[in-house]
Amino acid sequence: MTYSETIQFLYSLRLFGAKFGLENTLKLAALAGNPQQQLRFIHVAGTNGKGSVCAMLEAIYRAAGLRVGLFTSPHLVSFRERIQINRELISEDSVAQLVREIQPKLKQFPADHHPTFFEVVTLLALKFFADRKCDLVIWETGLGGRLDATNIVTPLASVITNIAFDHQQWLGDTLDKIAAEKAGIIKPGVPIVTATDAPAALAVIEQVAAQRHAPLTLVPSSPTPAAPLPLAGDHQKINAALALAAVQVLQPRIPVSADAIRAGLATVNWPGRLQLVPQPDGGRILLDGAHNPAGATVLRAALERDFPGHPVLIFGALADKNWREICKILAPLPAKVFTVPVASKRSAEAADLAAAFRAANPRVEATAIASLTDAITACKHDPYIVITGSLYLVGEALERLGLSPSGPGERGLNEWTAPQIRQ
């Protein structure tokens, strides 16, 4: 099986949709010898900031000399981004080999309970990290927490970044319901660290932590920076404080020096989040995956404080996101807006996005355009461009701008159908 054939096999798994529940992942892991039992984890959940916190934790522990696995989703361009060791992407050969090994095990499931794409990928990651004898794995949830496939592990520590509105149709329509799903990663006696400050959400986390006798550490919303950060935005200071709090909680089990902490935070890299791309003509393009209202609020604050001016905004969003609210939040900032479809069956209509911008700010010039490529061409002489609204769009932009090598159509693997609960 070639790598290209492997990717096509992974595409075929999307036919089984997305399902919440641990039964299949536990069975798959058992068939593979329970690789999760050979590993140590920090499990990270939350609405926004999960990826940045994971990247910071990985950088700190790698600077301390550990062999660190990193599991995140979605990927921006290449599927291989999801599974890394010491920030080296899993090789194409390793992906193909792992898929070959798992295929016979999939035949032991009835057709109506076939493992989903994410369940299979979760096992691929566990097997890869165990085979490569990682000292520690930074382990990001996919969606929610309680019934997410990643929740079969018992970590050294759990982290919940924050709780905000996103995926309400599956996680709940109130912050306390969403928090209950995220708090499902809290394990008995395992330390939990959070920067959640929404009172209703924090109350749920505190209650679950108390019930499970899990020591709880709260990170303040205005922390003192531990070290200079290469990632832009004040929200990254909170993410860094959260990562640092997790490191401190685990000091008795995994000691890390102050020098390693500083070195890790000073060199952390996480593409597509307030990523500034200088242009040869002196212009600048800013990429940010602000895909929900909370993310848009953070982006707006960063633009007003750190990137002043009136940019040209290129915006695309998925239809199942609260794009009207995102447009409302961002509408006062740009000089003009080009709305584009996202390369997804779930894309919102570009014309609807443009209308939402005009409704929120009648002074803004908002134009629907056929594609991201056309939008970039239309504003190629503008000195300041912001591309945002969806991580899918940011991934496409990274390819179009030559910042990430194109894979054989791998961005489509991020597609998924509405999750079902598997009891």
Image (cartoon, helix red, strand yellow):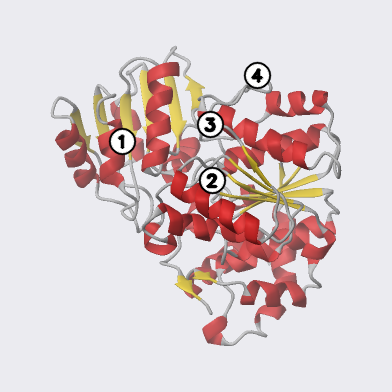
Q: Nearer the viewer, mark 3 or mark 4?
A: 3
Q: Tags 3 and 4 in contact by the CB under 8 Å rule?
A: no
Of marks 3 and 4, which one's residue comes earlier in the chain? 3
Q: Which residue is tagged 2?
A: 77
Q: In the image, is 25 to the left or to the right of 402?
A: right
Tell me which label, 4 or 2, sits earlier in the chain. Answer: 2
The amino acid type of the residue labelled 4 equals Pro
Pointer 1 or 4: first along the chain: 4
Q: CA distance from mark 3 to mark 4?
A: 18 Å
Q: Earlier in the sequence, mark 2 or mark 3?
A: 2
Residue 172 seen by the camera: yes
- The residue singled out by tag 4 in the image is 228
Q: For the residues carrying marks 1 and 3, which lies nearer the camera in this image?
A: 3
Q: Which residue is mark 1?
A: 374
Q: Which secondary structure, mark 2?
A: loop
**Tag shown at residue 343:** none
Numbered disc 1: secondary structure: helix
Q: Tell me what residue is drawn at x 38 percent, y 50 percent.
A: 343
Q: Nearer the viewer, mark 1 or mark 4?
A: 4
**Percent position (x, y) of residue 79?**
59, 52
In the picture, measured across the screen, residue 206 lies left or right of residue 395, that is right
Q: Residue at x 36, y 41 (%)?
A: 293
